[in-house]
């Protein structure tokens, strides 16, 4: 069925991407068809350095910095109605990987309620992620599946994945989701019963629990190897909320299985929680209203327990934790989503006579007779969107696009399309990609932004005030796995835009590049800002820390992109 009225996907123009068969133009150090033995000593030294930084060899296996856009763009994407923008050769499919239903102990909605809302709010894909718990592991994971299968049939232009919200042993929560198939329930059920922190009583900050988390990630990879499921992904949710995702744990998940553990929420859900009382919950965006606890990583500053322009401190701090991973050459991507449990100003309540402990679900919601003004969530797609560059409209293409890092996120419909490319001569890569160039080559960043293409769900047309280019050096692996800063990353260029309609084209020259670097993008409506935590020389006008009880999410809108790398040799 066609939904021509659905908006939020933008438009763009096709650009040439190099195909996968262009290895003849690569420098020998980068051309993996040339064996180590055929290289000169200096070429071999170069290749070894790139391997150490994670940018070569392992990166290729991880479908990340070297696997990226070139090969994928060589496939001819199928069209998908009028729902989604084609930009830079990809379909950009908007979605949400963090959604709760009546099968969560703190949820209430049916699967079909969320799927209908996601579809109406312009989403192409979504993941149902009920909480890992004893009830869910015992019966909920099976009981929700027929509802998901029925929703796939009923709403056939929104892809509905089944997943769960994993209580990561020794850490926070995470989304785990699988490609649909005959074993989707069996694999999720075995995983939850064997590796969920709540089910296994393994939530505390111990080495044994950290090892159990790694074993869980390894189990997921094994299910793909054994062809039990076609694909699995794991993304860390609200990572800075309680301070219990230490930097070394994040690195360990990613290093254990870089094709499974691929990223984290750059911005948490629960964004309406910041609306001031009495018309709102009066908390923090994302319910980031915590203080350090017994299991918190002691190195994190107090500022890390708050959101910054609605984004998690790990993502929002230029030169902070996210950048410290990117500076290692580690592909680690960000997302945004609703974490939708109970929607602000909705009128539903849980069905009467529910017995969650016995049934693993609440009875279907009913009309409650009033507006739920203390609820802190939005419907999927109503406020937060994760846009994934996919080669076609399919479950596999969405998972491949996330793994490749072809992802940008926005709040409040700030922009409707983003086509960002690094270019050198006739070569180009997009988000998540790795541009391989000869040392000293001229590299340019070219960005085409489709501005808001209609009012957002708060009934106003947002205006993009500014776009920032953030650049950092790739310095290789860190000795201290708990590092969460990197010294060379900073805002290198800011473009004033101050427009709300049409499109804008921005270009920035990286100059002649003689060492590995990465760039990422950030944009704002300009309503709130502050000098970044690492100082004005690093981030002169970043997001401001959100104020508990006075953080209207619609008055402070940002978008973020995933990075692109330049790899000279």
Image (cartoon, grey):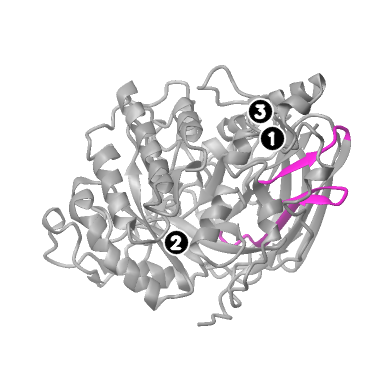
Count of marks, rendered view = 3
The majority secondary structure of the magenta stretch comes to strand
- Is residue 372 highlighted in magenta? no
First in residue order: circle 2 vs circle 1? 2
Decide: is 454 above or below 221: below
Residue indicated by mark 2: 126
Marks 3/1 in contact by CB < 8 Å: the verdict is no
Lateral position of residue 490 relative to residue 143, left or right: right
Q: Nearer the viewer, residue 517 or 463?
A: 517
Marks 3/2 in contact by CB < 8 Å: the verdict is no
Query: Given this view, does label 3 or label 2 mark the residue nearer the observer?
Result: 3
Res. 378 mark: none
Res. 539 mark: 1
For disc 3, the neighbor class at 10 Å (few under 14, some 14 to 19, many from 20) is: some
Q: CA distance from mark 2 to mark 1?
A: 34 Å
Q: Which of the 4 image quadrants contains residue 243?
A: top left
């Amino acid at each position: 069925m066609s939904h021509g009225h659905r908006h939020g996907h933008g438009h763009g123009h096709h650009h040439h991407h190099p195909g996968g068969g262009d290895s003849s133009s690569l420098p020998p150090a980068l051309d993996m068809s040339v064996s180590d033995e055929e290289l000169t000593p200096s070429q071999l030294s170069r290749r070894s350095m790139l391997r150490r930084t994670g940018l070569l060899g392992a990166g290729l296996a991880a479908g990340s910095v070297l696997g990226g856009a070139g090969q994928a763009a060589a496939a001819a994407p199928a069209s998908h109605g009028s729902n989604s923008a084609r930009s830079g050769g990809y379909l950009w499919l908007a979605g949400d990987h963090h959604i709760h239903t009546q099968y969560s102990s703190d949820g209430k909605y049916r699967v079909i309620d969320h799927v209908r809302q996601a579809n109406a709010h312009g989403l192409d894909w979504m993941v149902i992620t009920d909480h890992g718990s004893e009830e869910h592991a015992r019966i909920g994971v099976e009981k929700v599946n027929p509802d998901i299968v029925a929703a796939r049939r009923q709403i056939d232009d929104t892809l509905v994945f089944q997943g769960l919200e994993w209580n990561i042993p020794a850490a926070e929560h995470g989304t785990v989701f699988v490609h649909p198939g005959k074993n989707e329930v069996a694999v999720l059920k075995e995983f939850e019963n064997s590796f969920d922190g709540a089910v296994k009583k393994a939530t505390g900050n111990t080495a044994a629990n950290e090892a159990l988390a790694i074993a869980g990630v390894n189990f997921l990879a094994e299910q793909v190897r054994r062809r039990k499921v076609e694909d699995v992904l794991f993304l860390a949710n609200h990572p800075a909320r309680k301070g219990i995702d230490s930097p070394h744990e994040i690195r360990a998940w990613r290093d254990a299985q870089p094709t499974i553990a691929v990223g984290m929420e750059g911005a948490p859900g629960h964004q309406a929680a910041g609306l001031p009382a009495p018309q709102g919950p009066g908390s923090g965006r994302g319910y980031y209203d915590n203080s350090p606890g017994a299991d918190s990583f002691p190195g994190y500053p107090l500022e890390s327990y708050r959101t910054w322009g609605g984004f998690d401190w790990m993502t929002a701090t230029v030169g902070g934790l996210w950048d410290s991973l990117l500076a290692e050459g580690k592909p680690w991507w960000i997302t945004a989503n609703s974490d939708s449990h109970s929607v602000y100003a909705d009128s539903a309540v849980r069905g009467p006579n529910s017995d969650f402990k016995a049934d693993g679900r609440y009875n279907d919601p009913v009309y409650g007779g009033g507006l739920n003004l203390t609820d802190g969530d939005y419907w999927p797609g109503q406020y937060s969107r994760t846009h994934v560059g996919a080669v076609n409209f399919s479950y596999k293409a969405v998972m491949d696009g996330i793994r490749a890092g072809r992802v940008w996120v926005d709040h409040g419909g700030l922009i409707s399309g983003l086509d960002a490319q690094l270019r050198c001569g006739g070569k180009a890569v997009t988000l998540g990609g790795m541009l391989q160039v000869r040392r000293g080559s001229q590299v340019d960043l070219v960005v085409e932004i489709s501005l808001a293409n209609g009012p957002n769900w708060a009934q106003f047309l947002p205006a993009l005030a500014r776009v920032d280019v953030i650049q950092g050096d790739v310095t290789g692996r860190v000795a201290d796995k708990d590092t969460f800063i990197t010294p060379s990353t900073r805002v290198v260029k800011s473009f004033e835009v101050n427009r709300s309609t049409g499109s804008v084209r921005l270009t920035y020259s990286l100059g002649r590049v003689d060492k590995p670097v990465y760039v990422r993008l950030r944009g704002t409506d300009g309503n709130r800002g502050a000098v970044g935590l690492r100082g004005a020389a690093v981030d002169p006008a970043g997001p401001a820390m959100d104020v508990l009880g006075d953080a209207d999410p619609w008055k402070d809108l940002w978008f973020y992109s995933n990075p692109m790398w330049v790899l000279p040799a």
